[in-house]
Image (cartoon, rainbow, N blue to C red):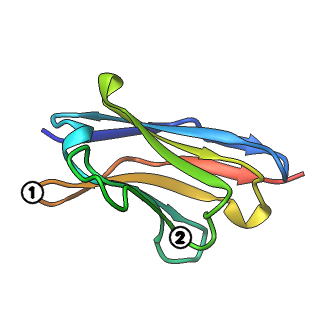
Amino acid sequence: QVQLVESGGGLVQPGGSLRLSCVGSGFSVSAFAMRWYRQAPGKELEWVARIASARDTFNTENYAESARGRFTISRDDAKNTVYLQMNSLKAEDTAMYFCNVWTDRDYYGQGTQVTVSS
C-alpha cells in the first residue's frame, strides 16, 4: 500500500529556511517521479517541484517559477525519502505542503503546514 508522510513544516520568519521531508512506503521513491505541491488558504493546489525517477537522466529537476532559485528538491534512496529545501522564504510561501507520487494513481500525503510570518 502506497503511503506518503510529510514532516518538517513550521513557523519561520521571512528570509528563513525549512527542509520538508516525505517518507514513502509501499513503493520505491527512486522508481517514480516525485512532486511537491502546496495549497494556501482559499487557493487551488499549486505544483511546486518535481524530481525525476532514478532512471531518467535528463531534466531531472523542475520547479515552478515561484520556487526556482529558492527551493531544491532532492531524494535519498536509502531512506526512501524526498526532501524540499526551502530558502529565502516569503510570506506568500505560507501553505500546506503535500508530497505526491503517481504509481497506479495519484497519491498524496496528509501535508505539513508551513507558515512564514514575522
Asked whether, in this view, residue 29 is left or right of residue 68, the answer is left
At x 31% / y 41%, what residue is drawn? 4
In the picture of the structure, the residue carrying the numbered disc 2 is 64
Please name the amino acid that badge 2 sits on.
Ala
In the rendered image, the residue lying farthest to the front is: 57
**Residue 59 occupies quadrant:** bottom left
In the picture, the disc for residue 6 is none
Q: Marks 1 and 2: in contact by CB < 8 Å?
A: no
At x 32% / y 59%, what residue is drawn? 58
* Observer-nearest of 62 and 9: 62
Q: CA distance from mark 2 to mark 1?
A: 25 Å
Q: From what the image shows, is residue 23 above or below residue 65?
A: above
What crowding class fits label 2: few (fewer than 14 Cα within 10 Å), some (14-19), or many (20 or more)? some
Whole-percent x and y of residue 18? 67, 40
Of tags 2 and 1, the one toward the viewer is 2
Please name the amino acid that badge 1 sits on.
Asp
In the picture, the disc for residue 104 is 1
